[in-house]
Structure formats: C-alpha cells, structure tokens
Amino acid sequence: MDKLAIEGGVALKGEVSISGAKNAALPILCAALLTPEPLTLDNLPQLNDVRTMRSLLSQMGVRAEAHNGALTLSAKQVDWPLAPYEMVKTMRASILALGPLLARCGEARVSLPGGCAIGLRPVDQHIKGLQAMGAEIDLDHGYIDAKATRLIGARFVFDVITVTGTENLMMAATLASGTTVLENAAREPEIVDLADCLIAMGARITGAGSDRIVIEGVATLHGARHAIMPDRIETGTFLAAALAAGGDVSLAAVRPDTLEAVIDKLVEAGADIVTEPTRIRIRREPGPGSLKSVALRTMPYPGFPTDMQAQLMAPMTVADDTAVITETIFENRMMHVQELKRLGADIEVEGNTAIVKGVRALTGATVMATDLRASACLVIAGLIAEGETVIDRIYHLDRGYERIEEKLSALGARIRRVA
C-alpha cells in the first residue's frame, strides 16, 4: 500500500493547473445513461472515483472510448440497470445512477451506498423525491428497487439540503412527463455544471444554482459535448497549502467565483490573493505573526464548504492565536484532529467545534489518513512540520486528487510516493 513521505519547511513557488471537478464529473458521467446517443466529456479528472464510476457504467452496458484527451460514453443499450454493493460500497456517489436508470429504463436496482466514514449521509431524500414523481420503491436486503413506467413531474421540497439528492432528482426529471419543481435545492456550482450538460443534451432546466429548480420533462435527450468545470476543492486545497507553507503560487484553469467564502478566509488569515477570471495568485511571506487564526463555520454553498474544513485546520495549527472551527454538515468530520495532534497540534474538540491553539511548530511523525479531505489536511500539515511526515492509507487521497504529489513537487515541496 502506497504512502506519502514529506519533508516540511519549504515555501511553495511556481504555477500549477487544476484538474476537472470530481464532484461534477461523477453525476455528469451518470447523465450518459439518459440518452442512447454519445456524450463526450472534456477535462475529466483521472481519479479513482472516476475510474470506479466508469467501471460501474461499463457493467450496465455503457461503452467508453478515450480520444484526444476526451472521453465519449455511449449508452445505446443499457443491459443491466444494477449498481451492485461491491461497486457502491467504495463510492457513495454511485447512488447517482438511480435517477437516470429509472427515467431511462423504467427500473433500477441500486445498493445503499457506502464511501467515506465521515458521518451518516442518508438517501431518504432521493427515495422520497422519486416516490413523489410516481416511482414504486422497495428496500430489499440493502438494495433500492425502483420501478416506474414513466416518471411524472411533481413539486418536491427537500427536508434537508442535499447535493446528490438534488442532482439525482434533476436528472430523473429531465425525462419525466410534465414539470418538476425542486424546492430547497442545493446550490453548489457542480449542480450548475450538471444542469449545463443536461441542457446541452436537450433538457429544459431553469434555476440551477438557486434553491428552486424547475425541470420541464422531454421525451428524449440527445448526445452532446461538455467540459467538466475546474475542481474548486482541489483549488482550495492548493490555496490552503500555499497559505500554510508560505511563498508565491499561481493556480491556472480555475473558477475563483466558486470559492469566494474560502478566499475571504484565506485573506483574513494573512494571504495576499489576486484573482483573474481563470487564475488565482496567492502570496504569503513566512515570518512571525504573518499567519493569523480565523473562525469559520461550514455551511451549504455559498457558505464555507465542509470539504475545505480539514484543509484550513492544518495552517491554523501554527497560526498566532486560537482558531474556532465549527462543522455543521457532517457529524463525524473531525477524525483528522487526532492525527494532527500526533504532529504536535494543540486541538480540543467540543461537540462539533474544534478549538485550535497555534503552536510554534509541528513535528514530523507517521500518521494515517481516515477520509479524502482528512488526507489533504495531513499533506498540508506535513508541508509545515519539522522533519519527515509519513502518511499512510493514501488511497483515500487518490479518490479525489490527481497526482497531488507531482503538482506539489512542481511547486518545490519535498514530497514523494513510497511503497
């Protein structure tokens, strides 16, 4: 099993390009199930989660062909509308096949999901929404069995904001009879990217990016070509790394408009940030007092993203005061705290709040990644720790970051992958 070894204490300098967004790519890959015509995707990130989703679609009969950096998916015939537990347990985003399969095939059998152990992420909103659209759904031995001759447009109010729930119902509604209105919908940019892809395929969708999305169902969707948006969480991770280590870093192929809450906190913490439409430059001169503690509270978009909580906690461990970090989205997303404490961090957790008192320095040690974003947090901590930090179980990291050690090495970091 691979590990990462990091020698800390080097400021980061240079330029790196950001990959396509994992959280946009996964639902858009599932959108290929909605049409018998080819869907071509550009800027698709090379990640383990993307490979898992491609394997899942392949089992269903979807053919994939890579050419000139793009991937063309063809679901001319869906042979097997099943998402088995063996696939779904490794990646909960597999639940996104449920809506498209039901809308296109009239039936679906999808395992209840697994994925990162960061807390309960129930799929009841997916099920209730599809039932509101006329689907018959049974839960059978850990599987969701769904049937519908044709889904019918309906008004559905989400009890809680859910990104994958919004995406699943939006895809299902594109082929429903009549108009579907989704209230209290999630507003994340990845939902807008999915809507843009669906619209290119002939869907009629308005309101994506707001809490009210209206989908007018059509009889069929056609093929299209779509470029996956830049990954705002990868962007934020590299920004947090530059804040922690100091230096001068430029990020290319980015969308600063999707990261305003993160950028505001980085500036508050002492970073000098300049944004252009597709570029961000971040600078921080290392030195006493240049890294300031901040308070943050995770919120649904456009608030501070839960997927950036762990990464910003890393630089706060060596900031000049006390940071108060509150997690409101997932109840078990502080597992990185114990690993940061192994590096010498002074952190106390009270309920869903971490109180982070800045220390003079972290010291290298062997630590273990517990989930995807915790892995990124430990990488950032390793960049600023004295001596060598070894991170075990980095298969979590490979689910969501494309060649992160190569990109950081290009910025001057002393990081290497070891067996």
Image: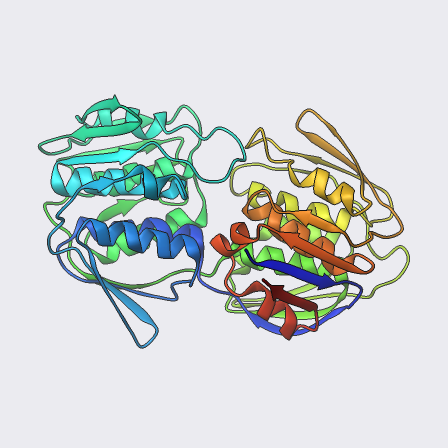
Q: Is residue 159 left or right of residue 286?
A: left
Determine the residue positioned at 59% across, 52% down: 260
Quadrant of image for the N terminus? bottom right
For residue 283, what is the image quadrant? bottom right
Determine the residue positioned at 28% across, 49% down: 56
Determine the residue positioned at 44% across, 27% down: 160
Quadrant of image for the C terminus? bottom right
Task: Find residue 91 and report its horizontal and vertical position in percent.
Answer: 40, 44
Q: Is residue 411 left or right of residue 244?
A: left
Residue 280 visible in this rendered orientation of the protein: no
> Height in image: 135 above or below 373?
above
> Height in image: 187 above or below 143?
below
Residues 330 and 171: in front is: 330
Q: Is residue 30 left or right of residue 274?
A: left
Q: What's the coloring here?
A: rainbow
Task: Find residue 306 and report its horizontal and vertical position in percent.
Answer: 57, 41
Task: Find residue 339 and report its horizontal and vertical position in percent.
Answer: 71, 43
For residue 219, what is the image quadrant? top left
Task: Find residue 57 and report its horizontal and vertical position in percent.
Answer: 25, 51
Residue 316 visible in this rendered orientation of the protein: yes
Residues 259 and 378: in front is: 378
> Height in image: 131 above or below 274?
above
